Image (tube, rainbow, N blue to C red):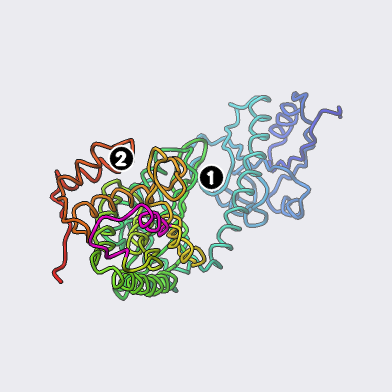
Amino acid sequence: MEMNEKHIRVLLIEDNPGDVRLIQEMLSEDSRNFFEIVHADRLSKSMECLKGDCIDVVLLDLGLPDSHGIDTLHAILSENNKIPIIIQTGLSDEELAIAAVKAGAQDYLIKGQMNGCLLSRSIRYAIERKLEEDKLRSEEQMFRTLAEQSSDIIVLVNRERVITYENPAVERTLGFKPEERIGSSIFERIHPDDLSIVIDAVTTLENNTNTSVTRAEVRLQHKDGSWRTFDGVGSSLVRDAVIEGGIINLHDITDRKITEDRIRKALEATVQAIAVTVETRDPYTAGHQRRVADLARAIATDMNLPIDIINGISMAATIHDLGKISIPSEILSKPRKLTDIEFSIIKLHPQAGYDILKDIDFPWPVARIVLEHHERVNGSGYPSKLFAEKTLLESRILAVADVVESMASHRPYRPSLGIEAALEEIKKNRGILYDNKVVDACLKLFLEQGFQLITLEL
């Protein structure tokens, strides 16, 4: 055998001596592979050869003295299903060929239509396919083992968006047995408000092989009618550059969301208490922070910012003047225009508010937003004269909301200037003092959507 030849052991199960010699001659023509043929003329004699792993491939005749037809193939597979099997028979029977391949044969060759090249290639391909099948089967078994043990719900879906597999976690989490969900649409039991998000995520995965992972928070209905919240992660199942379906991992975060909601409500109550404390010292601005928060939230919503950022802006706006608690009340309530010295004291309140808030572990950059809400796009603001690119978008939104509300409301030293004057101010200084996009959103709210600053009667 040459050094570059591959040694392939072939179990030839054939009772016709002429066909045995012909196959030997055909395989001897292959210069790239050395075929060692082990011959058995009966099914019973072949069984001993099938034990162990000394055979690489089986060439099987379906018409043997002690076995006939597809049962011969089944007998070989029951003895050893790890060895690739090629049927070689004189029967040109299409139905039998299909049945043989479905049963586990790698190929179906007809005697009289074979040649050395065809036979050699069929053997090589059969061995390679079998190796790939075994590898795939091993990977599938590993996946199934991991999936069966996972506490997260794992879902497989096909191109038709139909569930083809769910692991046992679905029963523990949603009350359904896995078999109850097989064949169902992936969109069943999804909360109506979350349906569009899931459809968009699935569509993205279906239409782009380069999109590896999508993530979404989604609510699913339990069998008892209640709702559970999940952190869902999905990816495409791709074979030969073709998307065949998807796999989704659902991690139950319901308890975490309940805890977060309780903390958020407690935090909001605390912030509201702080806001009331500030306004108690400055009665002329009672409700100012609340109205600024309402306007800032509306602007952020119109700009299509994520809900988490919107909530952070609202929280910061509610206490943005917290630093005024350090300003003497006689300055805050002075009925005349402030002197330069008094105004310089007022300008300290963003820093004072930041110093109070900076060590509180908010889930948003509340302290920084408070610090920057009097900065201006061109760097003319205070306390740090920062240009736009050095400030947060949240801060620039709060700046516009604060100016509009302040000008439209009564102050100790002047009556209200009116909403028209406030809007003219931000329009005139769009891109100079105030962020372009923020101004556009604010103007749209008042001029096109009828937004109003709601003042509570005292």
Disc 1 residue crowd, few under 14, some 14–19, many 20+, Cα 10 Å:
many
Dot 2 alpha-carbon crowd within 10 angstroms: few under 14, some 14 to 19, many 20 or more:
some
User: What numbered label is drawn on residue 346?
Assistant: none
Number of numbered tags placed on the structure image: 2
How far, Cα to Cα, is label 1 from label 2?
68 Å
Residue 102 or 203: which is nearer the viewer? Answer: 203
Of helix, strand and loop, which one carries label 1? helix
Magenta-highlighted residues: 331-350
Q: Where does the image place residue 117, in percent across and percent down from the top left?
A: 67, 24
**Is residue 222 visible in this depiction of the protein?**
no
What amino acid is found at the position of numbered circle 1 in the picture? Answer: Ala
**Which sits earlier in the primary sequence, circle 1 or circle 2?**
1
- Residue 343, quarter of the rendered image: bottom left
Q: Give the answer, above or below, for where 442 lies relative to 371.
A: above
Q: Residue at coordinates 16% horizontally, 67% vertically from top-left? A: 456
Q: Does the magenta stretch include residue 339?
A: yes
Instruction: From the top left corner, tell me how far across and down residue 11 is, in percent.
Output: 73, 43
User: For mark 1, what is the residue?
Assistant: 100
Question: What residue would you read off at disc 2?
Answer: 437
User: Which residue is depicted at the point 73% across and 52% down?
Assistant: 50
Comparing 257 with 371, the one in front is 371
Image position of 126 (left or right of 92):
right
The residue sitting at 36% across, 52% down in the picture is: 340
